[in-house]
Each structure stands twice: as structure tokens, then as C-alpha cells.
Image: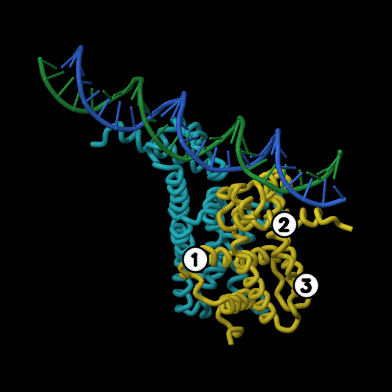
Chain colours: A cyan, B yellow, C green, D blue
Amino acid sequence: MPSVRRVDQAERRRRILEAALDLFARNGFHRTSTRQIARAAGVAEGTIFNHFPTKKDLLVAAAAQVVDDYFREEIEPLPRESTLEALRETFRTRLELGLRHAERIRFLLAELLSNQEMRQAYFEAVVLRLTDHLVRLLEQRIAQGFLRPCNVRVVAGALVGAFLTFLLVALLDEKRRLLTSSVSEISDELARLFLYGLEPGPAEG
Amino acid sequence: MPSVRRVDQAERRRRILEAALDLFARNGFHRTSTRQIARAAGVAEGTIFNHFPTKKDLLVAAAAQVVDDYFREEIEPLPRESTLEALRETFRTRLELGLRHAERIRFLLAELLSNQEMRQAYFEAVVLRLTDHLVRLLEQRIAQGFLRPCNVRVVAGALVGAFLTFLLVALLDEKRRLLTSSVSEISDELARLFLYGLEPGPAEG
DNA sequence: ATAATATGAGTGAGCGCTCACTCAGAAGGA
DNA sequence: TCCTTCTGAGTGAGCGCTCACTCATATTAT
């Protein structure tokens, strides 16, 4: 039977991680001191180091938390009915989820870009996971004849890129000079772009 | 006539900036000390502060340098002949230039993501500049009837996103598990994707 | 000689992390 | 039940260190 003590311990750890992630996302890893984290978590500074050997371990745990939270809500496969509808809905739900997690995703990306040691692990966890999923979906639908054959890895990269960029732009564009459309308008246009391309043609109607 | 001293001064400033940018790109802003910069530039630590009041000023100047260097090589408008060819060539030259500047672009992006103060200024300088250029090109070609009407801002965002993502992936994917194709293959596929879309059709041949 | 500039040891602030100590609560004997 | 002993997580002042930045002095150009 788990003692009362152990429950409290897990809860304390969770609170420290929560406080750290919150501060990292708002102010960045380097601008956040362990003293600040302790104050925000309502514990003594030393307690942090009972749960996480170093500040870097806290960073790694925080980054893992972001990835886990994002992928908890599963990316469901495109329904078979209409490819355009399916693409649009996938874009919409993913963009909305991303925008909800935007601050934390920015923190994760910033760390990935500036922290050489974290790249390998999280590149695998985030980018490969996203694109592998897309690659499987694309291959399946090409086999079914719904999409033309193509270099699926390049196309998957472009899809992830278009998606990530909207998150970044949403974060950077505080004056809303670029993100003037709504999420559903954007999803609409992206779905049409990737399905029909930019060439004028009969697909337009 | 400019004195020898003044030439030396400008040259010194340039060397300090060069050394700082090099170290920032390799190790990140926070992991680079002013002592390191001084040693790399071959000057005393105090000299840095004669040219740049604070370390942050050095960061701002370094970031500006990256933007200037990237945009020095002008983005020429698409030639009129073949839209597919033009798109492909634009992607190819931009990707190659980006890959040459990759480490510095990563540094710039990392700072943009983690440094709240720099966002406003550099968002304008980088993202708006790139997309505004694309928006103008797209509108022009739509008016000429070469492309279907569309939400040009969304499409421009997707193009910039696909482009940026390949740079990021190139930087993160050390084991080359995603970037298995050559730059020209990638440009080829992207041009076809954005022009014809993914739907099977007569455009395929 | 004078002004302009370069120098680098020095400064204090702030950092991650430690460790001697505290004390609530579990364990156990009577 | 009550008292004693044991345990280990929690605590926070403080350590050692690094940092950006300063300033008295040296060097150099005119």
C-alpha cells in the first residue's frame, strides 16, 4: 500500500515540473532561475534538487511533458469519405490544438534550436513522429488511388512545415498583420492548396 | 582623408561582430561569454564595450547581420516562361542559399523564439519581408491568369513554412533519416506539389 | 603635449547547487 | 495507549564560480 508520504512526493514533483514548465515557456530556460521555480512551486530551492538532480534534468522533463501533452490527443486517420473535407478537418483540429499549446511549443522549438544535446532525442520524438504518421497516411491514400504518386517524405515535410509555420507566425505576429484569417479559413485554403495546387483548372469550382 | 585610426576602428568593430556571430551561431548566445568573443576577435574584453555598450547590443547587431546577409542576394521575380520551372528554380536557389547560411539562420530563429524583445523587430524584417515578396509575386501571376485565385497570404505562409522547415530539418536531422533527397529533387517535388496539388489528374504526365 | 583609444585585472551581482539541520510521522516496545 | 526512537524529505543560508561590465593605466596618433 502506498504511504501518504509517497503520494505527497509525487504531487510535489508534479508541482515543481508544472511551475518550471510555466516559467520556461514564459521567460525561457536561461532567464528562469531555480530560486524562481522554487518560489512559484511553493517549495524550498533544495527540494527541487531532491526531485531533479540538475536544472538540466528539469529542462528535459519539461520538454518531454510538452511532447506528451501534444500527442496525448491522438491524430486520427483521415476518414475515407471526402479527401478535401478530411484534409481540412485534420488541419483545423491540429492547428487548434497547436494554438492551445503554442507557448509551450515555442519553448520546445527554441530549446531544440539552441540546445545541441536535446536535438537528437526530440527530433525523433517530434518531427519523425509527425512525418512518419503523415507518410503512412499519404501512402495509404495513394495506394487507394485518391492521391497521385509522389515523394511522400518531401510532401509530408511540406505539410508539417506549413503547419509549424502557422504556429510560429501566430506566436510572432502580435499585431496580426499576417494571421488575418480565421483558423477555419486557413485550414480551408491549405486543404485546397495541397489537394489542387495553384494551377487554374476544373478543380476550382 | 580618413585617418588610419578610423579605418582600424571600423575594422575592429567588424572583427568583434564577426567573432561574436560565429560563436553565437555555434554555441548560442547564452553559452558565449564576452571573454570568449574578445579572445576570438583578438582584442581585450574592454574593447568590446567601447564598440557595443552591452552584450545585448552585440546580439542585436549580429541578428541584423544575418538578415542583411541573407537578403543581400536579391530574390529575383519568377521568369515568365514556365511556371513549374520558375517555381522549381526559386525553391532550389533559396534552399541552397539557406543551407549555406543554415547555422546562422538557426541562431536567428532560436533568438526570435526565446527573446521576447527581438520578436517585433525581426518578425518584420524576416517573415513579413519574405511573405510580402511572395504575395506580390502570387498576385501578379494570378492577374496574368497563370495561377488560380486564392488567399495569397495563406498560400505565401505555406510556401515560407515549407521552405523554413526544410532548413530546420536539415539542421536537426543529423542522421539524415528525413532529408534523404537532394536539394534539386526536393525543389522538384515542392514545385509540383504547390502547382498541381496531390490529386491525381492530367497534370501528372 | 594632448586627445583618443586599448587594455585586462577587478567588481559585485547572480547563478546552480550543497549540506547541516529540522521535524512530522512511522515503527516498535511496554 | 503512550512514550521513545528512527527515518528521510524538506529547508534555506551560503559556497564556489562565472558572468557582464568598469576603470585606472598604458599605448598610440597627431
| Residue type, mark 3 in image | Gln
Q: Are marks 3 and 2 on the same chain?
A: yes
Q: Mark 2 or mark 1, which has the lower sequence index?
A: 2
Residue named by callout 3 = B140
The residue closer to the viewer here, B40 or A172, is: B40
Q: Is residue A130 left or right of residue B30?
A: left
Res A26 visible: no
Q: CA distance from mark 3 to mark 1?
A: 36 Å
| Residue type, mark 1 in image | Asp
Q: On screen, A26 above or below B153? A: above
Residue named by callout 2 = B14
Q: How far across and how far down the image is residue B11, in percent?
A: 75, 57
- Judged from the image, the secondary structure of the residue bearing numbered disc 1 is loop
Q: Quadrant of the N terminus of chain A?
A: top left
Res B172 visible: yes
Residue named by callout 1 = B173
Q: Mark 3 or mark 1, which has the lower sequence index?
A: 3
Q: CA distance from mark 2 to mark 1?
A: 33 Å
Residue B189, by quadrant, is: bottom right
- Judged from the image, the secondary structure of the residue bearing numbered disc 3 is helix
Q: How far across and how far down the image is residue A152, in percent?
A: 50, 74
Q: How far across and how far down the image is residue A55, in percent?
A: 45, 42
Q: Residues within 10 Å of mark 2 (few under 14, many from 20)?
A: some
